[in-house]
Image (cartoon, grey):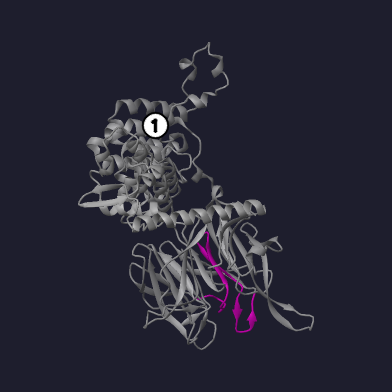
Amino acid sequence: MDPTKELKEELRLYQSTLLQDGLKELLDENKFVDCFLKAGDKRLPCHKLILAACSPYFREFFLSEESEEKKNNVELDNVDPTVLESILKYLYSADIDLNDGNVQDIFALASRFQIPSVFTVCVTYLQKRLSPANCLAIFRLGLLLDCPRLAITARDYVSDRFEQICKEDDFLQLAPHELIAVISSDALNVEKEEVVFEAVMKWVRTDKENKVKSLNDVFDCIRFRLMSEKYFKEHVEKDDLIKGNQDIVKKVTIIKDAFAGKLPDTSKGKDSKNDADEDVGDEDLLPGYLNDIPRHGMFVKDMILMVSDTATVAYDPLENECYLVALSELIPRNHSSIVSNSNQVYVIGGLYVDEENKDQPLQSYFFQLDTIAGEWVGLPPLPSARCLFGLGEAENCIYAIAGKDLQSEESLDSVFCYDSKAVAWKEGKKLPIKVYGHSVVSHNGLVYSLGGKTDDKKCTGRLFVFNPKKGEWKDLPPMRTARSMFGATVHNGKIFVSGGVTEDGLTASAEAFDIASNKWEAISEFPQERSSINMTSSAGSLYAIGGFSMVQLESQEFAPSEVTDVWKFEDDKKEWSGMLKEIRYASGATCLPSRLNLFKLTKL
């Protein structure tokens, strides 16, 4: 930075601080006070110069032809004196105590009396506090107070999380113009337009008598040409509210023609003599319900997510491209990860010490990936600190299964279940045996636990399945090869396992369990003996990434070494084929499939 500019900036800050401190001192000592603001039962002293400098409203009032008596004693109707005191405190000291309970009142009063400094502070606070629970209220507040910056930020937040937020009660309370402002956006994060239609119809049916009057306008914001024709016929055409509105029925006929390849003749509404419109395409003149521009959420792609203690990277095996999803300095190196049916990514691991919890002070960190914000969000830690455990998912719950206690190093059979709706952990049904280094997979609402080492440090091939509805574990046919620290995933209705550690050391053997027939079958061996392989099924293909193999050192001794290559299982040939010799983002990472929006990612 230029030394001269730096000096000027320091002098400016010094003078601003000096001036601010001097003004507060004058107010505290009640010196040069020349007016009072009367709100409720309070009479607050201040200076006309300060009010006029900070507020166009007060500047105009003090320069008006009002009597000096009214200017000296300003009556403010319908003003909470506590809120007014907070604003005056900020004007004199640049200090304000904002919280969720008072920010809206302070924001509204700052807007009413045109105090931009306080207004801006409130907007910034609300933007940082946006959450699924309050984003719609903040969006409506931004519209009400005519604050585009806040309204647009809140609307974008809603658009990014539309599929979640449209299920909230607040969504159903939106006014028609508010709903239109949300669903007309290209940035709506939905994979299918059907979601928008269903959200709109649910919104209408919450107050059918009043909202049905606005359905014709809202209908124009739904992009029906992005739906499948079958869905349109079965769900849109046959909807009773749609059939009951003749204006909409006419639009339905036009949409049906569009599906058949016949768009309305837009030239009829054009002035043939107006040359200025000649470069405007017909698509630009089509009604909103024929809009076929994809929403941003429709640019999702199946990727392989690699989560390490430095970064979370998405790998596209088809294009051989990598994208940064989030930095992951908070993620423990030794962790387990899982992706839920709803595409939510969770990580558990490491050691978290809760000094206030005398019964269970040692816990494991628990994080959820916010792919939109590009950050990991902390959740209630796992009450039992452990390693070498498995993660499963069923019925909106995450299961942390067995493993080894981090403090005592004892094998565990305990199971903890995280309820995402209750945002809390609870103990679940114990695994029939104590085991660690096992693998856990989930499929069709059931959780499977395979292999591992028992408390006598011997490998097991046992396979268990947990049914959360019955609350019980059940034995299934065991693996042909007892193993631990191996790769496992569900692919095409089968549980594929590969590699791992046996009683004789590393293995390359692989096998698959057909869930429907309840039988194991041998498959082609992995090309190299290795443990801790990351196996994942993405976009219909089975991949194996990284792991540990034995490598000969210069001393001629063998030692375990991490590899970061990528292999693909060719289903037609029933064999493995190499894809990448090395992908550095796989180092120390767990890998899992995830659907991610390319709009939100940065290519590496």
Residue 47 highlighted magenta (yes or no): no
Q: Nearer the viewer, residue 490 or 288?
A: 288
Q: Quadrant of residue 504?
A: bottom right
Quarter of the C terminus within the rendering: bottom right
- Residue 355 position (above or below residue 288): below
Highlighted magenta segment, given as a residue range = 478-507
Name the residue at 66% across, 54% down. Answer: 3
Visible in this render: residue 168? Answer: no
Q: Which residue corresponds to mark 1?
A: 220
Estimate the x, y position of residue 403 in percent, counting from the top left.
48, 79
Q: Image point 67% across, 52% down: which residue? A: 2
Side of 440 where 576 appears, left or right: right
Residue 112 appears in view: yes
Above or below, 207 against 336 in this view is above
Element at badge 1? loop
Residue 354: percent from the left, percent from the top? Answer: 42, 78
Q: Which residue does the image show at 62% across and 75% down from the upper left?
A: 531
Residue placed farthest to the front in the image?
32
